[in-house]
Image (cartoon, rainbow, N blue to C red):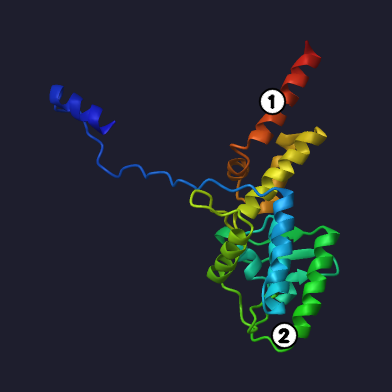
């Protein structure tokens, strides 16, 4: 547009040329890696090879929670013991994105895993230095950079990581969102009505942010197209 405006200005000096940097360049998000259910199981199995035992238990519970609840890594790492209600199966996210607070209900199977982890953690680390739910092998708060490093090592062991393929911890969140919508499509659910529910569960400010997670997925597009064709056939 600036080039075109400069061209017009040569004809009409009154033409205004927009200054550089007037509009921000949209941030390009990295293409997500969508984990299959089998790959998530393999990730959980691989955590058993980590040493010492407290690290293995921590990463098994952490990765399982991220995969099953679609949480952000930072949200999980800042959970305190009081934030994890193992009786009712609910997490309290105190400082989500934009400093918002929300409740995250859990499936009973996830709650059971977290309860087992808490017992193992307290046995292996009876005097932690922080009140975080997930702790390091020294009883300190887990750092995101350390989680990324361990996770990268695990994906290399599984053969998931290559020069052009770099699975991230955050991709577990994307995989959760996509898998949820795929299940809804297969069940014939009312997707427009349910997307705001998923958006709230993920902690998005508005549903538009959720739709980005659900884009460019061949399986999802095929299901949506088949459902649209079926509905169109019923009306014919």
Q: Residue 201 appears at what percent x and percent y?
A: 71, 52
Q: Residue at x 26, y 37 (%)?
A: 18
Q: Is residue 57 above or below residue 228?
A: below
- The numbered mark, 1 or 2, whose residue comes first in the sequence reads 2
Residue 51 visible in the picture: yes
Q: Please identify the quarter of the rendering in which residue 132 is found.
A: bottom right
Q: Tell me the number on the disc at residue 24.
A: none
Q: Front-most of 236 and 9?
A: 236
Relative to 157, say whether 124 is above or below.
Answer: below
Q: Which mark is residue 225?
A: 1
Q: Position of residue 52 (x, y in %)?
A: 68, 79
> Could you tell whether 35 is left or right of 7 in the image?
right
Q: CA distance from mark 1 to mark 2?
A: 52 Å
Q: Quadrant of the C terminus?
A: top right
Task: Assign a secondary structure to mark 2.
Answer: loop
Q: Quadrant of residue 79?
A: bottom right
Give the number of the disc on residue 125. 2
Q: Nearer the viewer, residue 30 or 129?
A: 30
230 above or below 212?
A: above
Against 217, residue 119 (above or below) is below
Instruction: State the residue at coordinates (63%, 43%).
Output: 207
Judging from the image, what secondary structure is the residue with disc 1 in? helix
Residue located farthest toward the top when viewing the structure as drawn: 236
Q: Residues within 10 Å of mark 1 (few under 14, many from 20)?
A: few
Q: Residue at x 78, y 78 (%)?
A: 120
């Amino acid at each position: 547009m600036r080039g075109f405006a400069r061209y017009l200005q040569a004809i009409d000096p009154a033409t205004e040329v927009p200054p550089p940097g007037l509009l921000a360049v949209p941030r390009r998000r990295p293409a997500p890696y969508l984990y299959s259910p089998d790959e998530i199981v393999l990730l959980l199995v691989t955590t058993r090879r980590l040493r010492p035992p407290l690290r293995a238990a921590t990463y098994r519970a952490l990765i399982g929670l991220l995969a099953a609840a679609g949480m952000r890594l930072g949200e999980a790492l800042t959970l305190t013991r009081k934030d994890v209600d193992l009786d009712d199966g609910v997490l309290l996210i105190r400082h989500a994105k934009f400093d918002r607070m929300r409740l995250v209900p859990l499936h009973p199977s996830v709650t059971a895993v977290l309860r087992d982890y808490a017992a193992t953690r307290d046995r292996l680390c009876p005097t932690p230095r922080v009140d975080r739910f997930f702790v390091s092998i020294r009883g300190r708060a887990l750092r995101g950079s350390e989680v990324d490093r361990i996770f990268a090592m695990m994906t290399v062991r599984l053969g998931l990581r290559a020069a052009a393929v770099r699975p991230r911890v955050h991709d577990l969140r994307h995989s959760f969102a996509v898998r949820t919508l795929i299940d809804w499509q297969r069940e014939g659910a009312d997707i427009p009505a349910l997307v705001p529910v998923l958006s709230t569960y993920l902690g998005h400010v508005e549903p538009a942010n959720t739709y980005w997670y659900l884009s460019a997925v061949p399986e999802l597009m095929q299901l949506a197209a088949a459902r649209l064709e079926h509905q169109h056939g019923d009306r014919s």
